[in-house]
Image (spheres, grey):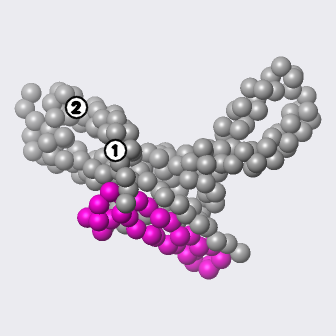
Amino acid sequence: MTITLDQIKSIRAKTGVSMQACKTALEEANGDEAKAIELLRKKGVAKAAERSERVTGQGCVASYIHSNGKVGVLLQLGCETDFVARNDDFVNLAKDLAMHVAGLSSLYVSPTDVSSEIVEKERVIWIDQLAKEGKPEAMHARIMEGKEKKFREEVSLMTQPFVKNDEVTVEKLISDMVLKLGENIRVVRFTRYSF
């Protein structure tokens, strides 16, 4: 099967990965563009995981102030090199993430960051809810486990659906940018201010 330059350019425009990676994916997918993009995504997840151990000693601080002046966010996004820190895609990602935190009231970067004290306070509420709903006690442990997992994901930036495209999580958005820029990228920290 012959792969055309137009096919390669089309996939590059959609994914942002190198021309060679696009060509290789198209060859593996026998020219099927949708399959090639899926292959690139699968490989991207693996590459992003490999890169996640690298040190992020560079980056930028992005800010977002909502139009009403009552909500603001400062967000620190880390990367490996100064070159990527100055890249427009990276800077725009940082700005989008700051806006996301303002809009969705993220409290933590990842679910593992949620403190056990906060979870315990929620557990008290959940136990009361289960008692009022009359759920069998044998199911309580599993229900509580599910509620805790869901709560941690809802208040954590990385597991929230992205505010501009709720079909992808913030984690997936960052993973795609890691694939595109070829460096580890991570949210170092953020602070949300509101009245």
Determine whether the residue tagged by mark 1 lies in a helix, strand or loop: helix
Residue at the (85%, 43%) spot, across then down = 125
**Residue type, label 1:** Arg
Q: Is residue 9 left or right of residue 185?
A: left
User: In terms of depth relative to the viewer, which is nearer, 138 or 77?
Assistant: 77
Which residue, given by chain and number where applicable, does mark 2 sit on? 32
Q: Nearer the viewer's eye, disc 1 or disc 2?
A: 1
Q: In this picture, which residue range is highlighted in magenta?
A: 58-86
User: In terms of depth relative to the viewer, which is nearer, 186 or 89?
Assistant: 186
Q: Badge 1: how crowded within 10 Å, few (<14), some, or many (20+)?
A: some
**Vertical order, 110 against 88 (above or below):** above
Report if residue 69 lies within the magenta region.
Answer: yes
Q: Tell me where residue 29 appears, x and y as whole percent.
A: 21, 28
Residue at the (81%, 47%) spot, across then down = 121
Spatial CA distance of label 1 from label 2 is 28 Å
Residue at the (62%, 78%) spot, across then down = 68
Which residue, given by chain and number where applicable, does mark 1 sit on? 51
**Residue type, label 2:** Asp
User: In terms of depth relative to the viewer, which is nearer, 156 or 11?
Assistant: 156
Task: In the rendered structure, find residue 146 and report the number of the disc placed on it.
Answer: none
**Residue 14 visible to an observer of this rendering:** no
**Vertical order, 194 against 133 (above or below):** below
Q: Quadrant of the C terminus?
A: bottom right
Which is nearer the N-term, disc 1 or disc 2?
2
Determine whether the residue tagged by mark 2 lies in a helix, strand or loop: loop
Q: Tell me where residue 147 appears, x and y as whole percent.
A: 72, 37
Q: Tell me where residue 148 appears, x and y as whole percent.
A: 71, 38
